[in-house]
Image: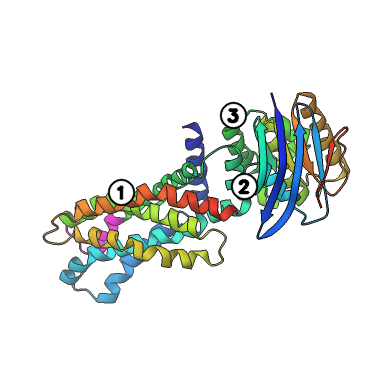
Amino acid sequence: MRTFRTLVMRDLRLAFAGGAWLPLAFFMLVAILFPFGVGPDGALLARTGGGIVWIAALLAALLPVDRLIAPDAESGVLDQLAVRGVSEELTVVAKFVAHWLSFGPLLMLAAIPAAALLRLSGDTLWRVELGLLIGTPGLAALGVMAAGLTIGLRRAGALAGLLMLPLAVPLLIFGAGTLAPRPGSALLLLAASSLFLCAVMPFAAGAAIRAARE
Amino acid sequence: MTSVAVESLACLRGGRMLFTGLSLGLGAGDAAMVTGPNGIGKSSLMRVLAGLLPAYAGSVGITGRIALANEDAALDRSQTLACALAFWARLDGSDAIAAALEAMTIGHLADVPVRILSTGQRKRAVIARTIASGADIWLLDEPGNGLDSASLAALTAAMAQHRDRGGIVIAASHQPLDLPGAVPVAIG
């Protein structure tokens, strides 16, 4: 447990020293630019705004992917952890937790001014926040998996994005689905997809790290 | 009891057999010196011993905790040296970082960011981490690379002290290191 805390603290320190504000700035930029693009039609903004928040959140989660694992693989940190008997699975779970902490809560905070810019009603904002709370861990898990799979590749950032986007489609569909007039079980399906990604992530990313060592 | 037992080890990398039939037995206080030309598999041997690569054939039996010091510093470049080493000290449950830095004569660099350290200073920091780790078996891959004569003397003293305490040192180097009584392991 102490090992886990030490790993998470280090990743958090590096994240906030190395531009954790970037996804946040990107997210806000989309929310600010979108009304300029579609014009001052309040009804249209309110109807499409929720989906835009979700697309912005998805793309913002992609931004830090190339600095999640690759620098540690290159500098030998992953090897040193393995020599100390820290399993790759524990390492990536720590990275997942730190990654989520560095963008999830901030994104949920930023959704409040974004909702104002996009003319979202209070009820919609509430559902966006709930959806983000459930969906962003899934996005973080996807990010860590994509980062693990692209260790040692050049231009890993762009490739990680291509890898990740199709897998993120369920999160996007169900996340935006929770905002529909009749959401049905979208929230449950969102939770299910997010949970699935979180559950698979340690094994997929851990195996990817071991494979990259060969 | 600290020991290293290697039985007819073979290592295959990228479809190429690097070495075969390597055997080595070390007990507390022993040392081994791995020599051989560049690219012959000294670093791969170190990684196999550290458990980072699978052995193609043969077996590796290790009793005791391992510390690996290779060309990858594994220190966060944006952090200060003290901060980067403190991370590993916390994982190792060690509080001997300051003393180890002094032993490698880089105590005055504790507050300097890792990215502006020179190659030799970084190497000394890696050796300091190895000393502070409290591990029983040191795997040193080219520990003398980039070190000046004063640092080499500090390294020699640290290795001697480690062996006096019952530790094992396995060093791979193309330059001579002062390891009295070390078992010679020639690859290639």
- Inspect this view and state whether residue B145 appears: yes
Q: Is residue A49 a member of the stretch shown in magenta?
A: no
Q: Nearer the viewer, mark 1 or mark 2?
A: 2
**Along the viewing direction, whichever of B67 and B5 lies nearer the viewer:** B5
Q: Residue at x 75, y 26 (%)?
A: B28
SS label for mark 2: loop
Q: Give the tally of numbered discs.
A: 3
Badge number at residue B139: none
Relative to A25, say whether B83 is above or below: above
- On the picture, is A155 further left or further right than B158? left
Relative to B66, say whether A127 is above or below: below
The magenta stretch is A111-121
Residue highlighted by disc 1: A195
Q: Residue at x 26, y 51 (%)?
A: A192
SS label for mark 1: helix
Residue highlighted by disc 2: B54
Q: Position of residue B45 (x, y in %)?
A: 72, 47
Q: Are marks 1 and 2 on the same chain?
A: no
Q: Which amino acid, by three-letter code, is at mark 2? A: Pro
Quadrant that contains the N terminus of chain B: top right
- On the picture, is B118 further left or further right than B81? right
Q: Residue at x 49, y 64 (%)?
A: A157
Q: Are marks 1 and 3 on the same chain?
A: no
Q: Which amino acid, by three-letter code, is at mark 3? A: Gly
Residue at the far left in the pictured view: A182
